[in-house]
Amino acid sequence: MNRFKQRLAAPGVRYGLFVSMGDQVAAEIAAASDFDWLIVDTEHAPNDIRTTLTQLQAMQAYDTDLVVRPTEGNRAQIKRLLDIGAQTLLIPMVDTAEEATAMVACTRYPPNGLRGVASARAARWSRVDGYFASADDQVCVIAQIESREGMTNLDAICAVPGVDALFVGPSDLAADLGHLGDPGHPEVQDAVLTTLHRIRANGKPAGVYAATPDAADRYAEAGATLVIVGVDTAVLTNAFAALAARFQDD
């Protein structure tokens, strides 16, 4: 059962965190911290298949929903992530409906898709009765919109069967709009809010990364129901800096 997918239609906003330290202890601390959902990031973090596996194992005992972001929309990597037990994938840099369709196909077994067949952790090494018959229905695909091209093709991406939600990435969107390093720029913020509204108008759950609590509130008011409010490395950096500053001489 994919709890994250089941909860997509639930009312309210679900708040989460990027898990990017590549360490199962840090991941378990995050899982025990009452976030609604967590994203194990392999796109911008030093995570590989094995570190992702150990983190999924460490976090699975907690009541938080787990998502994995691949490094890219790669068929082989998606197959491996699904085999180790990931059920919800946040696919970065989805710019067209054709790309979204290809990504969904990578998560489905034939004849519905291209996923390779193996007995692995996802099937509890053949101990899950009927796994192959039900696996497709338990996979959740989130397409990440991070460019002007993605915004242009947003309606078509929303219409792709198997795309369960869409997630806006303000930082890359800022870069593509000519405001590298400034996701708070008014043009970027207008694009983010417009995209969130359009996703919701298409009947899909909308997600977004919020760099500040104020941004999280603003995005939630715009209709986002999946809001990432931090990155574990940034949380640690800020906590260390605050603690050190408390004991530094004036």
Image (cartoon, grey):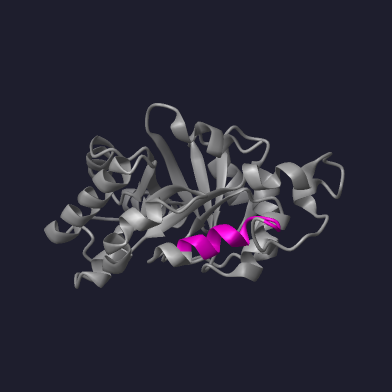
| Residue lying at 45% horizontally and 31% vertically, measured from the top left | 9
Q: Is residue 104 magenta?
A: yes
| Residue lying at 57% horizontally and 44% vertically, measured from the top left | 66
- Residue 122 lies left or right of residue 11; in this view the side is right
Whether residue 63 can be seen here: yes
| Residue lying at 28% horizontally and 41% vertically, measured from the top left | 201
Which x, y percent locates residue 163?
48, 50
Residue in front for this viewpoint, 198 or 79: 198
Which x, y percent locates residue 7?
51, 32
- Residue 15 lies left or right of residue 43; in this view the side is left
Q: Which quarter shows the C terminus?
A: bottom left
Q: Which residues are magenta?
A: 100-111
Q: Which residue is at the far top?
A: 11
Residue 226 in which image quadrant: top left
Q: Which quarter shows the N terminus?
A: top right
Residue in front for this viewpoint, 171 or 245: 171
Q: Image height check: is 14 above or below 167? A: above
Which x, y percent locates residue 209?
35, 51
Which x, y percent locates residue 239?
40, 49
Residue 52 in which image quadrant: bottom right
Residue in front for this viewpoint, 231 or 9: 9
